[in-house]
Image (cartoon, helix red, strand yellow):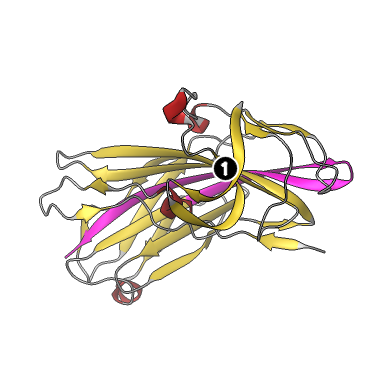
Amino acid sequence: MKKYTILLSLVTIIGLSSCKKSVDTTTTTPPSTLPGSPTLSNASGACYALVIDALLDNGSGGYDTTTINTPIAWFESTSQSVDAGTCSVNTAPLVLKDTFLGIPIANQWYSIRNDYSFNGGTPLAFKQTSSIVWKASGNASTGVPAINYSDNNPWGKITNFVVPKTLTMSSTLNITFSFSNATGNDQLFYLIKGSKGQKTGTLANNATTLSIGSGELAGLTEKGDQLEVELIPIKVASSTISGKTYYFVKEYCINKYVNMQ
């Protein structure tokens, strides 16, 4: 039985950065690492629709949101995808590539063309729709069949993501959240990351709270640091096509920062 656990670092691939508009004027960036993705059994390929909402303190009591939509896909091999013919997601063309906006991707997978949105392509808006259509014309020489699959799973989007803007080193980090649909998640990951280390793990699929004690925080962060908090609910669908199993994953990431005092 083949099993693939895919670790994604897509925000690093995208390489966006933002200036945190708060009193300390510390520069921050959207989340740097996603802690994981589901284990996919007997997979001959997988297509991921990733939405990242990076919430940055705007210094006026609220947050500015940077939303990133990124598709990636692999066929036959996670280390280097084989050619699957002409590929697309929601009509946007996908190409085999090893960089995105000039930043290296660990594996050569399918993703959106670097210049797509700059050359009149319709911007992807995964978060606004539950229907994501993946297509591949196939390639007999590499063993990839023709694929035309509509992933209609609802997003496991998080709402009411409550994270303290400031926290003392002697306090417990308490996070609360809820979901925008009632159908639940297939998996729920989290990441807590500071200048001294990071903690990753999974929660119950429909959890609504996460707490990290001061003892654990001391190993991750320090006074004056910005602590990164991410939650990633995941929905997974699969389809057997020409006797092979393909997975279609919706992965949503929401992120905030905590100023440690």
Q: Residue at x 13, y 52 (%)?
A: 25
Could you tell whether 245 is left or right of 131 in the image? right
Q: Is residue 206 magenta?
A: no
Q: Main secondary structure of the magenta part?
A: strand
Measured along the vertical axis of the image, is residue 50 above or below residue 203? above
Q: Which residue is situated farthest in the right direction here? A: 243
Instruction: Give the left or right position of residue 109, taking residue 120 as reference.
Output: right
Q: Which residues are magenta?
A: 232-261
- Residue at which label 1 appears: 111
- Establish if 184 lies above or below 5: above
| Identity of the residue furthest to the left in this view | 23
Kindly indicate the quadrant of the structure image that contains residue 42.
Answer: bottom right
Taking depth in this image into account, of 148 and 41 the one nearest to the observer is 148
Around disc 1, counting alpha carbons within 10 Å, would you say few (fewer than 14), some (14 to 19), or many (20 or more)?
Answer: many
Q: Tell whether position 245 is magenta.
A: yes
**Image quarter of residue 147:** top right
Residue 16 image point, x, y percent: 34, 46
Circle 1: residue type? Ser
Q: In percent of the image, x 31 and y 67: which residue is there?
A: 194
> SS of the residue at dot 1?
strand
Location of the C terminus (image quadrant): bottom left
Q: Nearer the viewer, residue 160 or 135?
A: 135
- Left or right, 244 with respect to 67, comes to right
Query: Looking at the image, which residue is at 73% across and 32% down?
Result: 149
In which quadrant of the rendered image does the N terminus lie? Answer: bottom right
Q: Position of residue 176 (x, y in %)?
A: 38, 50
In the rendered view, would you say 246 is above or below 43? above
Residue 175, how many percent across, how many down? 36, 54
x, y (%) of residue 185? 59, 46
From the viewer's perspective, tell me whether residue 58 is left or right of residue 1: left
